[in-house]
């Protein structure tokens, strides 16, 4: 297991006993950071945007890496959907970072994806 995975596993055991709830909480946190930046666009700094995008990208990097593991228990189709979402998020993040003067609405899709996935994780299977 790589170090990010170990940190993720350790943090999830220490803070919340249900891994789904932990994943939902970090997605909700990332969405909240992005939403605050969007809501206060004129007052926010480029550094705050960069930090929020980095946090979100790290979360999705762990999700994608975890889903790529052969022993991961999720069905193949769901793992593929996670990978596709991660790729989209990485591309959107790169687009925002490459834009000299990005528009706040570029964050909308990232916020919506995080909130929707979190809502699904909060529901009990």
Image: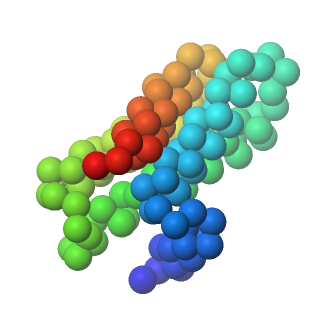
Q: Is residue 37 left or right of residue 25?
A: right
**Residue 123 occupies which quadrant of the picture?**
top left
Residue that lies at the very extreme toward the right in this rendered image: 43
Toward the viewer: 91 or 68?
Answer: 68
Q: Position of residue 101 (x, y in %)?
A: 67, 21
Toward the viewer: 79 or 87?
Answer: 79
State the residue at coordinates (63%, 66%): 15
Q: Is residue 87 visible?
A: no
**Residue 96 occupies which quadrant of the picture?**
top right
Residue that lies at the very extreme toward the left in this rendered image: 76
The image shows residue 116, relative to residue 90, as above or below, that is: above
Q: Position of residue 88 (x, y in %)?
A: 37, 38
* Quarter that holds the N terminus: bottom left
The image shows residue 85, relative to residue 59, as above or below, that is: above
State the residue at coordinates (57%, 63%): 16
Q: Is residue 86 visible?
A: yes
Toward the viewer: 46 or 98?
Answer: 46
Q: Position of residue 72 (x, y in %)?
A: 26, 70
């Amino acid at each position: 297991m790589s170090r990010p995975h170990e940190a993720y596993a350790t943090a999830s055991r220490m803070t919340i006993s249900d891994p789904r709830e932990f994943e939902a909480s970090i997605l909700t946190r990332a969405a909240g950071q992005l939403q605050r930046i969007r809501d206060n666009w004129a007052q926010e700094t480029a550094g705050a945007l960069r930090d929020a995008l980095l946090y979100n990208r790290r979360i999705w990097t762990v999700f994608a890496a975890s889903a790529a593991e052969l022993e991961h228990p999720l069905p193949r189709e769901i793992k593929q959907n996670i990978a596709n979402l991660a790729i989209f998020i990485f591309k959107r993040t790169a687009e925002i970072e490459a834009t000299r003067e990005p528009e706040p609405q570029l964050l909308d899709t990232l916020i919506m994806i995080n909130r929707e996935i979190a809502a699904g994780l909060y529901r009990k299977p």
